[in-house]
Amino acid sequence: MVLEIICLLLLALVVLLLVYVVFSWIPRPPEPVIPFARAVQRIVSPVLEPIRRVVPPVQLGGVSLDLSVLLVFIVVSLIQGALC
C-alpha cells in the first residue's frame, strides 16, 4: 500500500514537471490559466531549487538551458524503475 502511494506520488511529480516545462515555453499564459501555472510552479520549485544551486543553467548562445528538470526526470524514472 505504501509503495503504491509512493509510485503514485512519483507519477504525479512527473506530470507536474511536464506541465511546468510546457508552461515555461509560454511567455504569458492566458489569463484563466495563470493561477494554475503559478500553483504548478510553487509545487515544483522546491524540488528544482536545490538542484539549480548545484547545476547552473547551460548557456547556449542567447538561451540558457535549465538541466535541473532533466535531472529530476532521470532520478524519478530510476526510482520508479527500482520501486514500481
Image: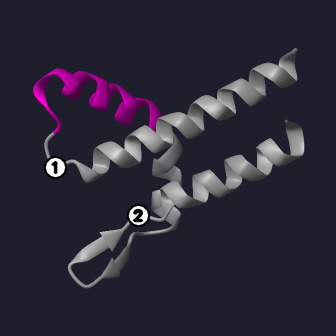
Query: Residue at left 69%, top 53%?
Result: 75
Q: CA distance from mark 2 to mark 1?
A: 16 Å
Q: Given the image, on which type of amino acid does mark 2 rest? A: Asp
- Percent of width and height locating residue 11: 65, 33
Is residue 53 visible to us here?
A: yes
Magenta segment:
29-45
Query: Residue at left 79%, top 46%?
Result: 79
Query: Residue at left 53%, top 35%?
Result: 15
Mark 2: which secondary structure? loop
Mark 1: which secondary structure? loop
Judge from the rendering whether residue 31 lies leftward or rightward of residue 84; answer left or right: left
Residue 44 lies, with reference to residue 65, above or below; the image says: above
Residue 68 lies, with reference to residue 19, above or below; the image says: below
Is residue 45 visible to us here?
A: no
Task: Verify CB contact (< 8 Å) between mark 2 and mark 1.
Answer: no
Q: Residue furthest bottom?
A: 61
Q: Quadrant of residue 74?
A: bottom right
Q: Nearer the viewer, mark 2 or mark 1?
A: 1
**Quick one: label 2 or label 1, which is nearer the N terminus?**
1
Q: How many marks?
A: 2
Q: Quadrant of residue 2?
A: top right
Q: Which mark is residue 14?
A: none
- Percent of width and height locating residue 56: 43, 69
Residue bearing the label numbered 1: 27
Query: Residue at left 50%, top 59%?
Result: 68
Residue bearing the label numbered 2: 66
Q: Closer to the camera, 29 or 48?
A: 29
Judge whether residue 50 is colored magenta: no
Judge from the rendering whether residue 39 lies leftward or rightward of residue 72; answer left or right: left
Q: Given the image, on which type of amino acid does mark 1 rest? A: Pro
Q: Quadrant of the C terminus?
A: top right
Question: Which SS does the magenta portion mostly show?
Answer: helix
